[in-house]
Amino acid sequence: MAEIRIQNVRKEFGDFVAVKESSFTIEDGEFFMLLGPSGCGKTTTLRMIAGLELPTSGEIYLDGEEISQRPPSQRDIAFVFQMFALYPHMNVYRNLSYPLVSQGMPRAAVREKVDEVARILGIENILKKPVGGLSGGDRQRVALGRAIVRDPKAFMMDEPLGALDAEFRERMAEELRALHDRMGATTVYVTHDQLEAMQMGDKIVVMNNAVVEQFGTPQEIYDKPATMFVADFIGSPSMNFLRFDGSVPEGAHSIEMQGQSISVPRQMQGASDKLVFGVRPEHVTLSDAGAYRGEVLATEYLGTTQIITLDTPNGELKARVPAGQVATVGETVGLGFKGEAVTLFDESTGRALR
Ligand code: ATP
C-alpha cells in the first residue's frame, strides 16, 4: 500500500519560489507522471516526496501518515537517480545485494531476495558478470533491481530514460511499464516529454512555472485541457488557438464564428473579454463548401494522415486529415470544426471555460 497525498505544498529556495501551493493525490499502485518544461518544479516536487528536500509549507502524506519533515531513510521510498548509477567494478550480484548488506540483512536472506529480483527482471544469467561489460539494457535492469531489492513502498524516477536514444528509450519505456504492471508498486516519474507521459502514465500532473496546471488521466488532459498552457503542451501538433474578437451579447447562448455556431458557457454570457477558440488538428475538417475558409500554406505527408497548414481570418491553423484527401498549396478550402471537440478559453486568464 502506498498512497501519496500532496497538500498545499510550497518550496522556496531563498527568494525563489520553485513550487507554489500544490495539491494532488497519487493513488496506490499508480504509474504517475510529473510533466512540464524545464525548470517548472517537477524534480523539486519529486525530491520533496522522497525527503531529499523539505517543503517550506504544506504537508505530504504516505498512506495517511504525515511524512513532510522525515528524513529519506524513514520514508521507505526508493529514488532511482539515474539508471546508470551503478558500481562498475562490482558484478551484478554485488550491485544488487549492496543495499541489503549495508542494511545488515543476513546472507541467506540477501541471496533469496537478489534471486527473486533477478527473476522479476530476467537477469538471472548475468549475476556473475561485472557491470562494466554489460549492454545498456542490462545495466538499466540492474539499476532498477537495485531500487527494487529494498521492497520500498514507492519508486521515484527522475527522467530515467533521458540519456537514451529514441529507439532504445521506447523499448525501455515499455519494459518499465510492464514491470510496474507486474509489481504494482506506486511509481512517480518525472519527464518533460509529453508523449512519454501520455503513453506510460495512469495519471499526469502538468506543471508550469512552479504551478500545477492540471491533474488527471492522459485522456482527460488531452480532451479537456484546463488551461491554454496544457492545451499547447500536450499533443503534436498542438491545439490550434483562434482569437475571437468581440463581446458575447447579454443573453446569448452561442457565438457565430464565420458561420460556425459555438455555444458559450453561462459565465461568459455578457462578457466582453477576448475569447480563444481551441481546436485540435484532428477535429478540423476540410471541404469545398463552407463559409469559414482558409488558404492552404503547406502540406506534410505522414503516412496515414497529413498535416495541412492553413491561413485563416483568425490566424494560422493546422488540420490533420486523411492522407488521401487532396489539398493543394495556394487553394482556398472550407473549414469545419467538430463542435463538441472545441474548447473555449478566456484569453485574460488562459483558463478553459466550461
Ligand atoms: P528540469 O527538468 O530542468 O530539472 P524541473 O521542472 O525538474 O526542471 P526543478 O529542478 O524542480 O525543475 O527546478 C525548479 C526551479 O528551482 C529551477 O529554476 C531551479 O533552478 C530551482 N532550484 C532547484 N533546486 C534549487 C536549489 N537547491 N537552490 C536554488 N534553486 C533551485
Image (cartoon, rainbow, N blue to C red):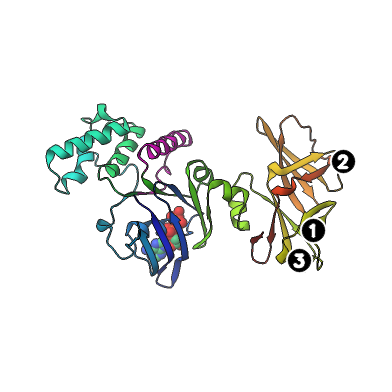
Between circles 2 and 1, the one closer to the viewer is 1
Q: Mark 2 or 1 closer to N-term?
A: 1
Q: Mark 2: which amino acid? A: Ala
Mark 2: C-beta under 8 Å from nearest atom of ligand 1: no
The residue that mark 3 highlights is 269
What's the distance in space between the residues labelled 2 and 3, CA to CA?
A: 30 Å
Residue 90 visible to an observer of this rendering: no
Q: Mark 1: which amino acid? A: Ser
Q: Is residue 104 left or right of residue 270?
A: left
Mark 2 touching mark 3, by CB under 8 A? no
The residue that mark 2 highlights is 289
What's the distance in space between the residues labelled 3 and 1, CA to CA?
A: 9 Å
Q: 295 or 321: which is nearer to us?
A: 321
Picture quadrant of residue 185: top left
Q: Mark 3: which amino acid? A: Gln
Q: Residue at x 17, y 36 (%)?
A: 111
Q: Is residue 63 magenta?
A: no
Q: 10 Å neighbourhood of mark 3: few (<14), some, or many (≥20)?
A: some
